[in-house]
Amino acid sequence: MKDFKEKVKIVEEEFDEFRTFINMWNIRNAYFRNSNKLIEIDGKMFDNDGKLVFDKIISFEYVVSYIDDFQKNEPNKYRIYNNMRISYIRKRSRVFDRNSYILENYKFVYFVTLTFNDYGINLCFRTRRKWIYRYLSHFPVYICNIDYGDSDEYIDNKGNLRIGTHREHYHCLIGLNDPNKCYFLYEWNLGFSYIEKCKVSEDDKVRLSKYIIKLTNHNIKLSTKGNNIIYSKTLKGV
C-alpha cells in the first residue's frame, strides 16, 4: 500500500518527469533494436505513430547517461518509475491479447469513438461514465478507454504537425456475431459516434493494438481517479 501511495503521488505531481523517463527508455530500446522507428522532423523526434517523443534530437550516449545518472542520484524514484514502466509493458501485452481475441473470434468488429456534445460534457463524470457503460451493455465483448485528446504536438495521417484539443472522449473496440445488434452502434445520444469496421488481418491487429496501447498512457496518470480500461466480462480470462 505504501508503494502504491508513493506511485500515485509521483504520477500526479511529477508526471512530466515520469514521461521523460519512459521516453528515454523507449529511445534506448529503439536504438538497441536498430529498428529505425524514430523519425526526425524539424529538430524533433517522433515515433512511428506520429507521437512526439522528444522535442530535440538526442544521441544514444545522452540517453544512456540520463538513465544511469537517474538510477545513481534518485534510486528510490528510479525503482518506482521502473516498476511502473514494467507494469505498463505487461499491460500492453494484455491489451494486445484481448484485441487479438476479439478480432479472431467475432465476425463483426468495430472501432468506435464516442464524443460528448456540450450537454454531455457538462454532466458530472460519474453520469458520463454510466452512459458509456449503458452503451457498451448492448454488446457481447468490448474494450473501451477514456482519452482526453493530446495537448502535445503530433503528426496527423496527412503528415501535418498538429496540437491536440484535450477534450474527453472514449475509444472502443467492439465485437459482434449477431448482425442485428449492429443497430446499437449508432445508439449514442450524448455527442457524435465515429464507427469504423475492422478487417481481420495481422496488420489490423497490430495497428489497433498500438492505438489502444497508446491510450493506456493516460491510465498511468488517470489511475488515481479510477479511469482504468473498461473490459467486458467475456475478456476476464483472456
Image (tube, grey):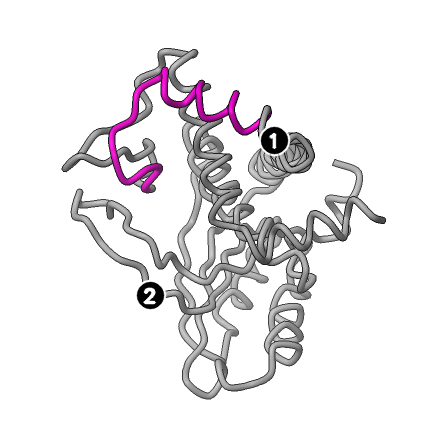
Element under label 2? loop
Magenta stretch bounds: 52-71
Residue 67 sits inside the magenta stretch? yes
Viewer-proximal residue among 47 and 27: 27
Give x and y (percent) for residue 164.
31, 60
- State whether residue 13 is above or below residue 39: below
Q: List the single residue furthest toward the front.
A: 73
Q: Residue at x 67, y 64 (%)?
A: 225
| Label 2 crowd bin: few (<14), some (14–19), many (20+), radius 10 Å | few
Residue designated by label 1: 89
Q: Residue at x 33, y 37 (%)?
A: 54
Viewer-proximal residue among 136 and 81: 81
Tag of residue 165: 2
Give x and y (percent) for residue 91.
64, 37
User: Whole-Å distance between the Cαs marked 1 and 2?
Assistant: 27 Å
- State whether residue 226 is above or below residue 203: below
| Label 1 crowd bin: few (<14), some (14–19), many (20+), radius 10 Å | few
- State whether residue 19 is above or below residue 43: below
